[in-house]
C-alpha cells in the first residue's frame, strides 16, 4: 500500500481555493487512484466518474484543469507536478523488490541456523525418550521379582494380620537398575494435613457442652442451662450463615464469653444474654418551646384547640 502525501497547507493553497471543495475532493481521489495503480499521475478519462460520488464530475475535472491542478493529455488527465510530491512507480516497485529480497534473506538465515531443525530434534528426542522409558520395562523384559509376592488378607490362627506388600517401582533405565522396591504400604507414615490443623465442618445438628464449656460459663456466672441455650443459639446462627469451624466447642466458649461481655438484654432470670446489642441511651435534646410543644400536640391530636 502506498501513502498519499498532502501538505498541511493543502486546503489553503490558491489553486485549491479556486477549484472549490467538490473539485478539490475529486483531486484527492485522483491522487489515491494514481498511487494505488502506479500510473505516475495519469487518470484515464473513463475513471473520472468512478473515483468520486459527486454530481457532474466532468465539470469538476474542467475546474481542476482551469485551476492548474490537472492537465489534459491523450486519453485522460495528468496530475500537475505529481512527481514533485508523490513517489514514482519505478521507485515504488524498486522498494517492494528490495523489501521482498530482505525478507527472503531473513528466512534463509533462519533456516540456515537450523531453528526449525533444532526444535524438531529436541521435540523428537523428548518424545522418543518418554515413549522408550514407559514402554521399555514392559517390552524389553525388565527384571521383575519372581515369583511375585502374593498378598493373603486372611491371617493365620494366632498371627497378626498381614501387611500389604510393598509397591514395585520400575527403574526408568529399563534394566540398568532393575526393579526398585519402595515401601508404600503400612510402613509408610500417614500424610499430615497442611499445618496440622483439623478440617473444618458445618455446624452439627446438636452440640453437647463438655466440662470445659460448663467451666467457662461458670466463671462468668452462667449455669449449665445457660451454656446449653448458648450452644443452641450458636448452632442456629452458624447453620443459617453456613460457616465452617474446626472446633465447635472452642467456638461455643467464645460465644459464651461474648454473651457475658457485651451488654445485651437477657431473656429472663437465669437466661443467657443472646439478644442483639442494646442501643446506647439517647441524650436529651434542647428544651422545646411551649408554643412549639402546643403546636405539636395539636397536630398529633393530644391537645384540642380552644
Image: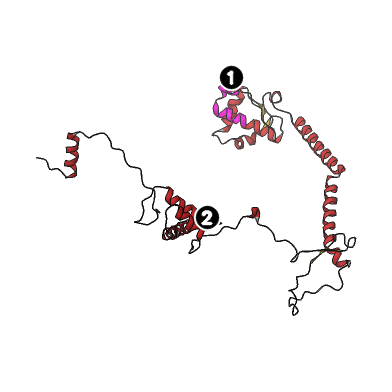
The part of the chain drawn in magenta is: 9-28
The residue lying at 71 percent from left, 25 percent from top is 83
- The picture places residue 216, in percent across and down from the top left corner, at 48, 54
Q: Would residue 260 be counted in the magenta stretch?
A: no
- Residue beneath disc 2: 250
Colour logic: secondary structure
- Residue beneath disc 1: 14
Counting residues from the start of the chain, the first of labels 2 and 1 encountered is: 1
Judge whether 187 appears above or below 14 on screen: below
Q: Secondary structure at mark 2?
A: helix
Alpha-carbon span between mark 2 and mark 1: 92 Å
The residue lying at 20 percent from left, 33 percent from top is 289
Q: Would residue 24 be counted in the magenta stretch?
A: yes
- The picture places residue 102, in percent across and down from the top left corner, at 81, 36
Judge whether 1 appears above or below 131 on screen: above
Q: Quadrant of the C terminus?
A: top left
Nearer to us in this view, 217 or 198: 217
* Number of other residues with Cα within 10 Å of mark 1, as a class: few under 14, some 14 to 19, many 20 or more: few
Amino acid at each position: 500500500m502506498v501513502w498519499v502525501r498532502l501538505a498541511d497547507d493543502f486546503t489553503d493553497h490558491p489553486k485549491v481555493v479556486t477549484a472549490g471543495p467538490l473539485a478539490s475532493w475529486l483531486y484527492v481521489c485522483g491522487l489515491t487512484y494514481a498511487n494505488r495503480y502506479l500510473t505516475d499521475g495519469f487518470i484515464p478519462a473513463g475513471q473520472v466518474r468512478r473515483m468520486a460520488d459527486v454530481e457532474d464530475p466532468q465539470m469538476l475535472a474542467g475546474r481542476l484543469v482551469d485551476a492548474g491542478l490537472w492537465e489534459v493529455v491523450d486519453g485522460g488527465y495528468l496530475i500537475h507536478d505529481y512527481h514533485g510530491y508523490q513517489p514514482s512507480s519505478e521507485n515504488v516497485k524498486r522498494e517492494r523488490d528490495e523489501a521482498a529480497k530482505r525478507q527472503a534473506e531473513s528466512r534463509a538465515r533462519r533456516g540456515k541456523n537450523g531453528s526449525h531443525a533444532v526444535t524438531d530434534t529436541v521435540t523428537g528426542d523428548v518424545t522418543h525418550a518418554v515413549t522408550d522409558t514407559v514402554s521399555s520395562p514392559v517390552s524389553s523384559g525388565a527384571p521383575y521379582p519372581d515369583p511375585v509376592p502374593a498378598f493373603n488378607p486372611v491371617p493365620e490362627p494366632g498371627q497378626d494380620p498381614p501387611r500389604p506388600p510393598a509397591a514395585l517401582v520400575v527403574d526408568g533405565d529399563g534394566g540398568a537398575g532393575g526393579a526398585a522396591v519402595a515401601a508404600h504400604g503400612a510402613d509408610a507414615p500417614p500424610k499430615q494435613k497442611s499445618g496440622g490443623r483439623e478440617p473444618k465442618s458445618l455446624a452439627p445438628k446438636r452440640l453437647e457442652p463438655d466440662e470445659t464449656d460448663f467451666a467457662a460459663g461458670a466463671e462468668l456466672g452462667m449455669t449449665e442451662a445457660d451454656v446449653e441455650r448458648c450452644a443452641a443459639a450458636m448452632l442456629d446462627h452458624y447453620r443459617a450463615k453456613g460457616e465452617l469451624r474446626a472446633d465447635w466447642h472452642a467456638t461455643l466458649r467464645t460465644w459464651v464469653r461474648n454473651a457475658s461481655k457485651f451488654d445485651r438484654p437477657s431473656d429472663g432470670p437465669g437466661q443467657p444474654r443472646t439478644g442483639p446489642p442494646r442501643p446506647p441511651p439517647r441524650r436529651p435534646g434542647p428544651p422545646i418551646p411551649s408554643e412549639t410543644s402546643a403546636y405539636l400536640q395539636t397536630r398529633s391530636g393530644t391537645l384540642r384547640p380552644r
